[in-house]
Every structure is written in structure tokens, then in C-alpha cells.
Amino acid sequence: MRISVEECANLLKEQDNILILTHAHPDGDTLGCGFALCRGLMKLGKICAVENADEIPKKYSYMYNDIVPIKFKPKYVVAVDVATETLLGDFEGKYHIDMCIDHHTTNTEYADNLLLEDVPAASETMLKVLEALGVEVDKGIANCLYTGITTDTGCFRYASTTADTYRAAARLIDAGADNGTINRVMFETKTKTYARLERLALDSMRFYADEKVAIITVTQEMYKLTGSNEQETEALAPLTRQIEGVEVGITIREKANGTCKASIRTFESVNAAQLAKEFGGGGHPQAAACQFDCGVKEAREMLVEKCQEILGKEE
Amino acid sequence: MRISVEECANLLKEQDNILILTHAHPDGDTLGCGFALCRGLMKLGKICAVENADEIPKKYSYMYNDIVPIKFKPKYVVAVDVATETLLGDFEGKYHIDMCIDHHTTNTEYADNLLLEDVPAASETMLKVLEALGVEVDKGIANCLYTGITTDTGCFRYASTTADTYRAAARLIDAGADNGTINRVMFETKTKTYARLERLALDSMRFYADEKVAIITVTQEMYKLTGSNEQETEALAPLTRQIEGVEVGITIREKANGTCKASIRTFESVNAAQLAKEFGGGGHPQAAACQFDCGVKEAREMLVEKCQEILGKEE
């Protein structure tokens, strides 16, 4: 069932012992939402915690390192920025989920669902929820929500960013968000190992379909050569789409077991979520992902073929 | 003489036949300021134009391609985003400058000077001027000012970006600014020639002073190999500072005559403008530039030595 911001706030006010779940392979938006809600509910005197199936990348530690963990039996479970239950990863089915706060149009409505349309980051919606809850947005909360907004908008760069998104950012900076530091950590800092991987990845870039498709292929061998790892490949995805004339940018990364995953980035001419769906994946219209049971070469061939089909149709 | 936003607006109201000058090698902020002011004054029925000493990069053409050029004898000259008269390039001394609207703390106050402190882009100040003039901000003006703000803040990324900057952006988007398209053109589009140059530049990156200094060296040979040119090297400057642990990032580019120019990017620990000043240059605390009469090798040695001195002192 769809619920409004006010209904969402009222439901949360009635509950206690609240467990908040983020999606697996957590990013800035799901974590920002989760820890901001956790901090807000704690300010209201409630017992709550954030959990997820995977390790949280260290760069997000400022979101939670001052939160004292509490052990409790969850009575109410809220998923944040989780479009489908499968995105909970190993936590899928572990809990009955009562509420979902999200911004993905692909959301499968598996719980009481606060889903505002045309909001580029779930953290922007979460700010509204906290305001409706009467929570005073402090520096800790502001840092979480600012992180979510800036990471999901590519630092306010994507076309999905609205005037309201900028206004939310202004409010969060007024509340003390360290925008300069957060953006530096999220967008301006490359580890030496990532910088080496990026160079190899750029060398691997190949063009297809009249140079409208650019594909980067990252192999396990590259991780060995650079000291980098799969976690660091996420940042490669936007590089493909940046080349003039490219409409579909794909980053294929080989997993340790020889299968692979593809991150797809597109411009308006191609729907990335639909392309990913052809291979059992999903996501946003301009950013999506899918998994393959085969190796990188075979996956690349299938992706190129499908892209040619889509780009051919378009003309 | 320093003037306020209101005094600036009142002076402009009294004038006609107004020539607006941007700095040489014009960027998004100086052009955004210039064409927004020009459009605003034209809406008030005034005769005016924007001029500068160099060619305007094509990507900014949307700022002016619907403005019908008028020939007139300038009676009042306004420089926008021009910290010193030398930055007018070949136009230095060509006109008596009556007014300057700027945001550089290094401004030499060579005219009636509207200089608001802690404003990351002159275009943010220009929005205030246009509002004080009673100009209705239309889509054309909004696109100019949004461009100035986003380019001078690295797409709202730099620490200098304030809550007011975000609010200005929100107002401009409300007024019709094409934020998605502008950011794509300014930040997400690499020409194939630039992409090739970037790969060679990254290969040239060397580290000094306990890896706190990273230097990229771009030679004329690299332009030949990649089909790129000096104009495209501006985008390389931020890459040096992005490597973890680097406090000073320098891009040295060789000119056709064998001399060279250095773009300096730093974090708070080092003042880029002061470092540039040691070699006769200048700029902002975290982004500055200077010229050398010698070749790239000699310039690099001098820069490394000075950096070691500065970083040594700091400890």
C-alpha cells in the first residue's frame, strides 16, 4: 500500500524496537537514509538499529561511528532505498518487512510504501519524513542525508536533480552538513590502487555500434596487477558514458568465480533499466545493472548485440 | 571603491551603451556573468554587448547565439569576474573600466568594485545584481548564471560552495535553467581527442615529496599524438589532486614556443595562490596558475623544490 509522508511519520511514531534495513552492497543513499532515520528515531527516544547483509565501505564510517549499538528484538522493520526484496541480498526473507521508504519507480511495493516520484535520492524523501516526525535535523543527520543526495545525484550533476533537491541540500548545509569534506571523500579521492585500475580500465575501453556503445572490461587479472578489488570498480561505470557520441556505456567486471556483472549507464535515448531487464537485471532509466552466468567475453557479445538491436530500432 | 549590490544596480540603471568585458581565455563563470548581465540590461531597454580578447569555446554558444549583435560606442565599461586588468589579455588598456563585478579576493580594485566575499562564483553575485535591477530572470539568463555557478564550483563539489549557492541554483532551475544538459556538457562530455590526451597525461603523472605532490606533464608531442590541443588541458588540472594523500596537484603544459604554464590545485594545507605567486602567478587558495619562461623540465624542478619547502615548513 502506498502511504504519504505524514502517514509514514505517524506509523513510525507508534512503533518502537525498529530495525532499519539497507540494500546489499550499500551505497551512500541507502546508508544515508538508514542512519539518518536511525538517528532521528533515537532522538525521539526509540530503540532502533541499522543492519544489512554486506560490509559497509569504510568511507561511510562517519555516518555511524558515534552510534552506540543496542541489542533488541525487532518489532517493526523498515527497508530504505530497497526497490525489491531481492536487493536485500543474504537478508532476503530474514525479516518480515513492514515499511519501505524508497524512490525507485521499479519498486515492487512489498510493504507499506512511501514512494515519492521524481526524487533523485531516497535521502531527499527521508528529510521530509524526519521533518514530519518533528525531528530537529542536527549535524549528524545532515551529514547522512547530504551524503545520500550527493552520491545518488553524482554531486548534483544528473538531469534528475531538481530545484527541490538543491533546496534540500541548502537546508542540510544550514544544519551543519560538511558538504566540502563529504564531496571530497565521495568524488575527489582515488586510492592509488583505484588510480592504477582506472588506467587499465580506460585502456580496455572498446567502441561498438558506430561508437555509440563504449565497453570497459575489468578482469580478475587487473585486480592482481593493480592491488585493487571489485568494490573499487563501481566508480568506473560513469567513465564509459563520458566519451562524446557514446549513448550506452557499459562496465563488465569479472567475478572471482569467472561469471560477471555489467553496470550500464545511458543517456535519454536508451533506457538502461530495460536493457538490464533483458538479462534479468534492473535499475533506473539511466543507470542499471545485470548479472551473467557466463564469462566477460560472452556477456560482452550479448550486450553488444542487444545494444545494436536497440540503437538500430531507434533510428 | 567598493560598492554594494544596490549601488551597483543604481549605477547600471543610470548608464547606457554598456560594454561588458570578460577575462581572457573565458570560462563558464566570466561568460555566464557577462551574458546574463547583457541579457538583463537589454531587457531594461539598454544597448550593450559582451567582448573579450579570445575566442569563446563553442560549448558556451547557448549563452549568446540568440543575442543580436549591436554596434555602438561604449560609454560605460563593466568587467566581470576579472580580478586584475592583466587578465583582460590583449584587451588590457583598450578601455577605461568603470565597474568591476567579481568574487576573487585577489581583486586589485581597479574600478568601482562589487566584490562579495565567500561567494564561489561571480555568477552568484550577478544573480543578486539582476534581482536588484528588477530584471525578471528568464530561461536565457538562468542558463548563463547556472553555468557560471556550476563550472566555478566543480558542479557544487568544492568546499567553497555554500547553502546560498545551492539556493541560487534552485532559483535558477525554477526559472528554467537546463541543469541536466549544462552539467552534461560541462562535466560529462569528453571528446575522443581529450580522452586520448587524458590517458597519456595520467601515464605522465609522477609523485614527489613523500607522494604529497603529483605532477602531470603535457607536451606538444602529446597534442600531436592525440589530436588534442592546449584548450583541452584545462580539464586535466583536477585529476592530480584526486589521488589519495596528494596535497598539491600540478599540471604543467608545454606551449608551442617551448615555455610552459602550470595549473595548481591544492587542499586546505597549502595555499595555491601563494605558491603560484612565487612564480608571478595568482588565483584562488585552492586553484591557481603561473607562467614560466623556461621548459617543462626546469619548471617542474622549480615547482617541486618550492613544494618541498612549503610542505617541509608545515610539519
Image: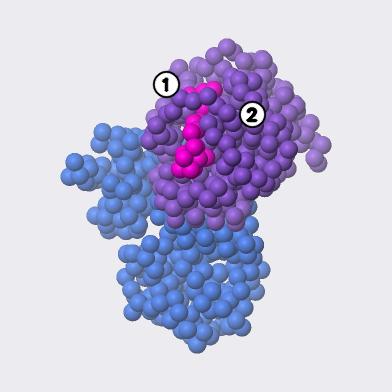
Chain colours: A purple, B blue
Dot 1 and dot 2 within a common chain:
yes
Q: Please state the horizontal and vertical placement of residue A227, each as a whole percent of the image.
A: 42, 21
Disc 1 to disc 2, how far (Cα)?
A: 39 Å
Q: Is residue B243 visible?
A: yes
- Answer with left or right where residue B185 lies relative to residue B216: right
State the residue position of label 1: A227
Please give the chain letter of the residue carrying mark 1: A
Placement of the N terminus of chain B among the 4 image quadrants: bottom left
In the picture, measured across the screen, residue A72 lies left or right of residue B4, that is right
Element at label 1: loop
The circle on residue B299 is none
Residue A102 vs B175, above or below: the answer is above
Q: Amino acid at mark 1?
A: Gly
Q: Which residues are magenta?
A: A37-55
Q: Amino acid at mark 2?
A: Ile
Labels 1 and 2: the sequence-earlier one: 2
Residue at x-position 67% and y-position 29%? A84
Camera sees residue A265: no
Residue A85 is a magenta residue: no
> Where is residue B114 shown, x and y percent of the image?
40, 74
Asked whether, in this view, residue B211 is left or right of residue A225, the answer is left
Q: Secondary structure at mark 2?
A: loop
Q: Nearer the viewer, residue B67 or B166?
A: B166
Give the class, few, some or many, for how many residues have Cα within 10 Å of label 1's Cα (few <14, many ≥20): few
